[in-house]
Image: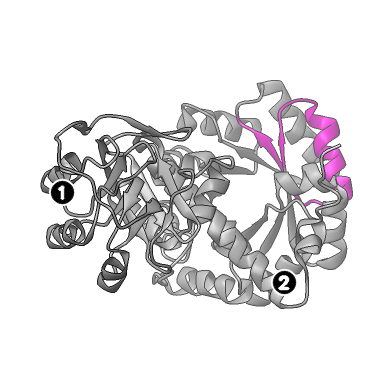
Amino acid sequence: MKPVLQIALDFVVLNRAVKLAEEAVEGGADWLEAGTPLIKSEGLDAVRELRRRFPDKTIIADMKIMDAGRIESESAAKAGANIVGVLGVSSDATIKECIEAGRNYGFEVIVDMIGVSDVATRAKQVEEFGANYIGIHIAIDEQMEGVAPFDKLRQVAKAVSIPIAIAGGINSETVVDAIDAGASIIVVGGAITKSPDAKSATADIKRAMETHQKVETKYFKRVTGDDIRKVLLDVSTANISDVMHRARELEGIKAIKPDLKAVGKAITVRTYPGDWSKPVLAIDEAQEGDVIVIDAQGKGPAVWGEQATRSCIQKKLAGVVINGGIRDVAEIRKLNFPAFSKLIMPAAGEPRGWGEIGVPIKIGDVEVRTGDWVIGDDDGVMIIPQEIAVEMANRAMSWKEKENREIKEIEEGSTLGKVSEVIRWEKH
């Protein structure tokens, strides 16, 4: 089977999905998928509208059927779907019912392997049942942890002879790897649906498929531990708060100078108001790229100034965050060093030597440990626990990509209310 490009329309608003589909078709999309979020939000009217708008396109209904195989698959087909999706983790009986219904009503069935532990064995089983396609699908939540789909794809490609669809973080760079690993159906979601220019994004992926040459992209990549800093430099503290379920910033702590960003792993300091001994000693213990986070109980006198800042610059540290007082701010601003503090004052304290370095501290309701990630910008300072740093960095980038698309739609004449259909989604 010649590789085809399928667009996963994972929206919750139908008119946005249709607008995106029109752009993608102009860019060369072959198949259109009514994504699960779209079907759950809009029902099978989403499939009906896609069939009406694109009568010559193959339409996939990503139903993720788990039970009642016949009635659910038939309903999707009657709404206009050419291909209907059932989950591989559902019972044999449910999968067989979908396949039999497809034979009777003239639609095809794809079995989605999301959540299946032994994908090769299950793929072989459902092929014997009569499935038309196998779907290798890395869940969005797994993508955010840096999981890639290609190992599973290779296993299945060796086990079955029917066409295989691959979904999960595919972009214009990885699409070549997907084809090489055995995919015939390239399912792309965010790399197109979150792009401000969906037509060009689609064309880039089609070109990569046809020429077998990767096309470089800035966005729509998911990272592992080594690349966290690069991603966090590109997203905002607002993005991070959103993906951490509206997590709060370090209360009351603001940037000393606008337009400077601090990103790095924390080295924590607990000290007493005005005691600048441990904050200064922490500079010598910190590693390149670290951010010193000081808890001075939110009170003065100052525990930080120009000379400490110059020392950080010498050590190539990424910033300082102070729950307490800072001084010499005119000089620090000239140095363009990212500094964040609760208080600004002229008076400094004394180096008494109280406190500790590297111990957990708490600023407001937020705990900070050495090794946690610190992100500071004009909106404030956010902390990402080290255990979930990869996931939250990827989720923040995904959120930014989503907003890039929404901003483009607003610039073209829409509004936030129309893009989000906010009235429809208000809590009742």
How crowded is the residue under tag 2: few (<14 C-alpha within 10 Å), some, or many (20+)?
some
- Answer whether residue 65 is magenta in the image: yes
From the viewer's perspective, tell me whether residue 15 is left or right of residue 241.
Answer: right
Nearest the viewer among 45 and 283 is 283
- Whether residue 149 is visible to the viewer of this picture, yes or no, is no
Q: Quadrant of residue 43?
A: top right
Horizontal and vertical percent position of residue 401: 55, 61
Of badges 1 and 2, the one in the foreground is 1
In the displayed structure, 82 sits above or below 285; it is: below
Q: Amino acid at mark 2?
A: Ile
Horizontal and vertical percent position of residue 88: 61, 31
Secondary structure of the residue carrying numbered label 1: helix
Residue that carries the numbered disc 2 in the rendered image: 410
Nearest the viewer among 387 and 364 is 364
The quarter of the image holding the C terminus is: top right
Q: Residue at x 23, y 45 (%)?
A: 349
Q: CA distance from mark 1 to mark 2?
A: 46 Å
In the displayed structure, 67 sits above or below 225; it is: above
Secondary structure of the residue carrying numbered label 2: helix
Q: Residue at x 56, y 35 (%)?
A: 114
Q: Residue at x 72, y 45 (%)?
A: 37
Q: Amino acid at mark 1?
A: Ile
**What span is colored magenta in the figure?**
63-88
The quarter of the image holding the N terminus is: bottom right
Residue that carries the numbered disc 1 in the rendered image: 283
**Which of the labelled discs sits on residue 205, or is there none?**
none
Q: Residue at x 81, y 56 (%)?
A: 421
- Answer whether residue 376 is magenta in the image: no
Compare marks 1 and 2 and give the one earlier in the sequence.
1
How crowded is the residue under tag 1: few (<14 C-alpha within 10 Å), some, or many (20+)?
many
Horizontal and vertical percent position of residue 403: 61, 61
Horizontal and vertical percent position of residue 71: 86, 32
